[in-house]
Image (cartoon, rainbow, N blue to C red):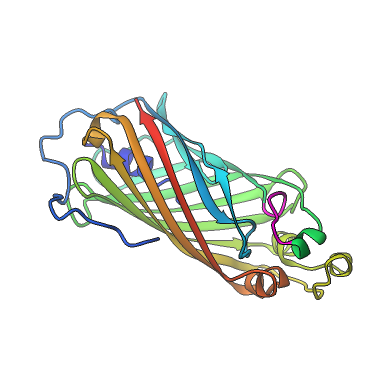
Amino acid sequence: MRTFAIAACLSAALAATPALAQDSQAAPGPPADTGDTVYDDTWLSIGAGVGYGPSYDGSDDYVAFPAPIIQGRVAGIGIQPRPAGLALDFIPDAREGMGFSLGPVARVRSNRARQIKDPVVKAAGELDTAIEVGVNAGLSFPKVLNPYDSLSFGSDVLWDVNGAHSGMTYSPSVTYFTPLSRGIAASLSLSAEHGDGDFMRYYYSVTPAQSAASGLPAFTADSGWTKAGATLLTAFDFDGDLTNGGVSAVVIGGYSRMMGDAKRSPYTSIRGSADQWFTAVGIGYTF
């Protein structure tokens, strides 16, 4: 069984957490005679779902949104999902021992660019959509607590190339993946985000013009950590065998806490909340 491949497939989100419900009959991992799997060479997963989360980072209003996903490995290049984006991994999976990942990453950031439910925040003005590109790198360690689990460390460094915030973010993460049975698997991810001065001022400062339009007090944000959180993802294979591909369902729950000037910003401290919850459900097909 290719632990790294299945872990990458299931721990996309990489996003972050209700309690994990375990079947008392579930074994700690798939049977030892796993044999060939759909993940051994070229494979692709496509899926779609619906998410429910804050209308902007720091909001206490929640909205629904579509959540498409594509992931896999084609021509030796890994495809890993990101929120509204994806990352490529140019380093082949290791069959034994420590694994490495390295490649480009890109995402679209539409924070306060649409779906603003709070009328006061909306009066401050919608922001431009950022297109962020950069690099991702990581390490993976298999067989941490059982023969089929893995522990992965990674980070994304991104720069806006669309002239929105024109800044940089750094996002480290750690993910633990384990099968709960042959047909059920889960991953728990811890992640954080750090923004430079340009990024923080764009999303969390209240300029004099924004203050006059919204009535919020003026505020100047500086570089620092924006949030930290955890995500739990659980996958259920419809035929009870994750190793042969096919149709599966995914349930995700996450919580993050706003930090620093992102928490102190009036958009969060007056009109929103530092506590941020997220959930999503989806269905996918792997071949």
The image shows residue 162 at horizontal and vertical percentages of 74, 43
The quarter of the picture where residue 71 lies is: top left
Q: Main secondary structure of the magenta part?
A: loop
Q: Image point 77% across, 47% down: which residue?
A: 163
* Residue 51 seen from this side: yes
The image shows residue 187 at horizontal and vertical percentages of 33, 52
The image shows residue 119 at horizontal and vertical percentages of 76, 61
Magenta residues (range): 111-118
Q: Quadrant of the N terminus?
A: top left
The quarter of the picture where residue 173 lies is: bottom left
35 or 155: nearer the viewer: 35
Q: Image point 42% across, 23% down: which residue?
A: 75
The quarter of the picture where residue 230 lies is: bottom left
Q: Residue 217 lies in magenta, yes or no?
A: no
- How many marks the image carries: the answer is 0
Q: Would you say 77 lies left or right of 39 here?
A: right
The image shows residue 4 at horizontal and vertical percentages of 31, 42
Q: Image point 80% across, 72% down: which residue?
A: 216
* Residue 16 seen from this side: no
Q: Image point 45% across, 59% down: which residue?
A: 254
Residue 211, placed above or below residue 22: below
Q: Would you say 270 lies left or right of 60 here?
A: right
